[in-house]
Image (cartoon, grey):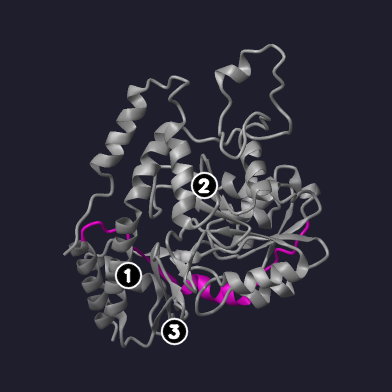
Amino acid sequence: MKKIERISTLEREYVGRVLDGQFKSAKNYCMVTELEKRFAEKMGAKYAIAMVNGTVTLHCALEASGVGVGDEVICPPLTMSSTNICILHAGATPVFADIDPDTFNISPAAIEAKITPRTKAIIPVSLYGLPCDIDAIMAIAEKHGLTVIEDDAQCFLGTCRGRVTGSVAHMCSFSFQASKHMTSGEGGIVTTNDPDLALKLRRYSGLGYGSIGLEKGRITKEDIQSPTFERHVVMGWNYRPSDLCGAVALAQLERLDELVEMRILAANHFLDAVKGCSWLKPQAVPEGFVNSWWAFVMELDTDKVGWFDFRRKFMELGGDGVYGAWMLGYMEPMYRNRAFLGREKVVGGDYSKGICPVAERLQPRLLQFKTDYFDEADSVRQADILRQTIESFS
């Protein structure tokens, strides 16, 4: 049985180096700079820009795409709401496109059906660790002149037809939030192969400072000591991460392969447990795709077993718990009440029930199981409890 540490001595060593530097200007931000360089290399991209979390990364990517008031951005309804909230941050209108009934990812055909003259960008999500069909989505984007911002918060080292997530779309956003494959408690990063987009990401996330650039993530003493120094060449936000987070993320990046491997091991144990069960359908992984399994998710036939009945039995037998899927984005009270903090004056959109029927049917039927077990014996035990739960309803 394989066993690793979630946080190892390496993370503690790198944090110690930052603290030993006492945040002096000459040494501060060195960890973030190294993280950006090595993350880009790992994901097969030319550039990576680190930020404070995986929501502002999406917001900055939208701003770099020129998205603003009057524009529409297509996104999936089934995912954590940061994916659509960032569109509101940019003053644009979220447009929800339905999902594939087998992979649970956004459907390329549904994307194309939602394109209008106001569409400016697409944010597909690699949900639960499964890469979206980026080839089909990029082809649609090229046909209509759209920017693709891939939300890979839940997908580290997943691959689509041999290419790692983070290397194909115009920009790809990752999260280092606590539940993700690699973490620094909070944090995020955007990859891109476009130097113009990379420069915009850098400046927009760094208060619009003109003296920062592709290889320079912060201003220096030499910059600011002159009374004639002009700082801000464009409006920006203060989205830069601390070197403490950079230190932890850098160490996690060095250990990413083994961290992802533990999730895949857990998912494989769960898959084995549900073999032969006709009323549980795991997330489909198409040929040519590798799922990194941020979570293990299945569709439950609720005509056979009630969702809460299944969860109750699993936990009675010692299971760690079963998570429900997120409420669909447009069905949250924020959309129902159009509580957009004044942006309701510029945000359009149809958010009525029925706009994404596949997602609406699936959402109350999905069972999400944790895969963040760093002792394989724990995931084996949970898979055995899942097997017992299935048997109790058979």
For marks 3 and 2, the one nearer the N-term is 2
> Residue 7 location, x and y as percent?
28, 45
Q: Earlier in the sequence, mark 2 or mark 1?
A: 2
Q: Dots 3 and 1: beta carbons under 8 Å?
A: no
Magenta residues, as a range? Answer: 348-375
From the viewer's perspective, is 142 left or right of 332?
right
Tell me the amino acid under the disc marked 2.
Ile
The residue drawn where x is 73% and y is 33% is: 234
Position of residue 140 relative to residue 392, above or below, is above
Q: CA distance from mark 3 to mark 2?
A: 42 Å
Tell me the residue that label 3 is attached to: 303
Q: Is residue 207 magenta?
A: no
Q: Amino acid at mark 1?
A: Ala
Report if residue 358 lies within the magenta region: yes
How packed mark 1 is, by other alpha carbons closer than 10 Å (few <14, some 14-19, many 20 or more), is: many
Question: In the drawing, what numbered circle is on residue 53?
Answer: none
Q: Is residue 339 visible?
A: no
Residue 134 sits above or below residue 118 on the image: below
Residue 373 placed where, x, y %? 27, 59
Residue kind at label 3, given as amino acid type: Asp
The quarter of the displayed image where residue 128 is located: bottom left
Q: Is residue 311 left or right of residue 59?
A: left
Tell me which residue sits at (62%, 36%) in the image: 213
- Asked whether 92 or 198 is in front, the reply is 198
Quarter of the rendering containing residue 124: bottom right
Distance from the alpha carbon under mark 2 to that under mark 1: 26 Å
Q: Are marks 2 and 1 in contact (CB under 8 Å)?
A: no
**Numbered tag placed on residue 189 in the rendering:** 2
Q: Picture coordinates of residue 133 (x, y %)?
A: 56, 72
